[in-house]
Amino acid sequence: MLKGFTHARLACGCRLAFREGVEGSPVAVVVEEKGLGCAIPLHVRDLPVYDYREALRPPTRFLPIEEEEYEEEG
């Protein structure tokens, strides 16, 4: 499934790895190595930084009903 890139380096110094995803997610982006100077607390080694499955799920909250167009009187 993966074609092309297998690794990337962020500006903060962290190294990312692209791996086969799990059910519903074609690609998993994982922090393979945390940069020495990285101050971003969300970058944790061996944890995914992006999970596409969230975008595929239906919303858990009711969305507001779209109002139809109306014409002003007068």
Image (cartoon, rainbow, N blue to C red):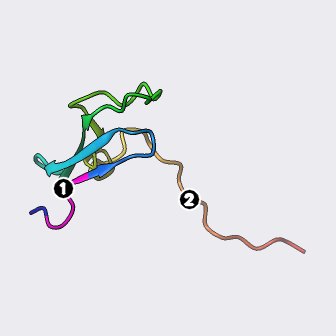
Residue for point 14% across, 49% down: 19
Q: Quadrant of residue 35?
A: top left
Q: In the depicted view, which residue is nearer to us: 52 or 57? A: 52
**Classed neighbour count for the residue bearing mark 1: other residues with Cα under 10 Å, few (<14), some (14–19), many (≥20):** few
Left or right relative to 68: residue 40? left
Do tag 1 and tag 2 residues touch (Cβ < 8 Å)? Answer: no
In the rendered image, which residue does mark 2 sit on? 66
Question: Magenta stretch: residue 27 in it?
Answer: no
The residue segment tinted magenta is 3-7
Residue for point 36% across, 45% down: 59
Distance of label 1 from label 2 (alpha carbons): 43 Å
Q: Position of residue 14 (x, y in %)?
A: 34, 38
- The quarter in which the C terminus is drawn is bottom right
Q: Position of residue 3 (x, y in %)?
A: 14, 67
Q: In the depicted view, which residue is nearer to us: 66 or 26? A: 26
Q: Position of residue 62 (x, y in %)?
A: 44, 42
Mark 1: which secondary structure? loop
Closer to the chain start, of discs 1 and 2, is: 1
In the rendered image, which residue does mark 1 sit on? 6
State whether residue 37 is above or below residue 30.
above
Which mark is in front, 1 or 2?
Answer: 1
Q: Main secondary structure of the magenta part?
A: loop
Q: In the depicted view, which residue is nearer to us: 36 or 55? A: 36
